[in-house]
Image (cartoon, grey):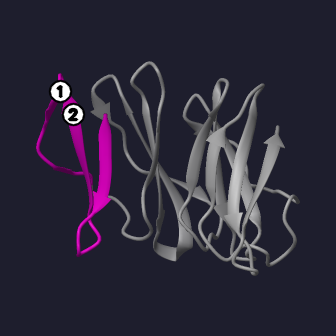
Amino acid sequence: MAVFARDRSGRLHQRSMVDGEWRGWVTLGGPRGGQPSAFASQDGRIDLFVRGPGNVAYHRTYSNGRWGGWSSLGGVISGSPTASANGDRVNVFVRGSDYTLWQQDLVDGAGTWWSQRDQFASNALTGAVGAAAGTGGTAWVAVRGPDNAVHVSTLSGS
């Protein structure tokens, strides 16, 4: 199990539990910005996402006992990214600068492209995006709308 948090200065840290014991905090460096979102696969790989300078989404992978470097996923986002599993890929969802839902898929750790989703009206997202894996390759996405209510949609494919 791994936990990710930012300290008061915005630095990103990780703490892991190994064999039932918590290890110390490790500084991960990288872009300062929004809250982290991570997805761990069954093989021990961790995909970590943050919003960084210039309101760009960034990604870092932990695999084979080591962290890789940070890479930009591009785009201009207005909220922290969130991720969920979808078969052999990781779906990344963000609130774009236009306050609509955008998605990028990572296949074998490599990003594809940003696609705008049309499940929610333009300028409809006011809070962070949440996502979870659904059945049959779908994803459940939850957002807070301008009415302050939580809206949920089931998405298939990108």
Residue 14 screen position, x and y as percent: 26, 48
Residue that mark 2 sits on? 17
Residue 10 screen position, x and y as percent: 29, 71
Picture residue at 77% right of the left edge, 69% below the top: 100
Picture residue at 37% right of the left edge, 45% below the top: 69
Q: Which residues are magenta?
A: 1-28
Quarter of the image with the C terminus in it: top right
Q: CA distance from mark 1 to mark 2?
A: 6 Å
Is any atom of residue 26 visible in this view?
A: yes
Picture residue at 42% right of the left edge, 28% below the top: 45
Picture residue at 82% right of the left edge, 37% below the top: 157
30 left or right, relative to 25: right
- Disc 2 secondary structure class: strand
33 left or right, relative to 96: left
31 left or right, relative to 116: left
Badge 2 density bin: few <14, some 14–19, many ≥20, Cα 10 Å: few
Residue kind at label 2, given as amino acid type: Met
Q: Is there CB contact under 8 Å for labels 1 and 2? A: yes
Quarter of the image with the N terminus in it: top left
Residue kind at label 1, given as amino acid type: Gly
Badge 1 density bin: few <14, some 14–19, many ≥20, Cα 10 Å: few
Extreme-top residue of the structure: 43
Residue that mark 1 sits on? 20
Residue situated in front as seen by the camera: 94 or 109? 94
The relative height of residue 148 versus residue 37 in the rendered view (above or below) is below
96 left or right, relative to 118: left
Asked if the magenta segment contains residue 3, the reply would be yes
- Disc 1 secondary structure class: loop
Q: Nearer the viewer, mark 1 or mark 2?
A: 1
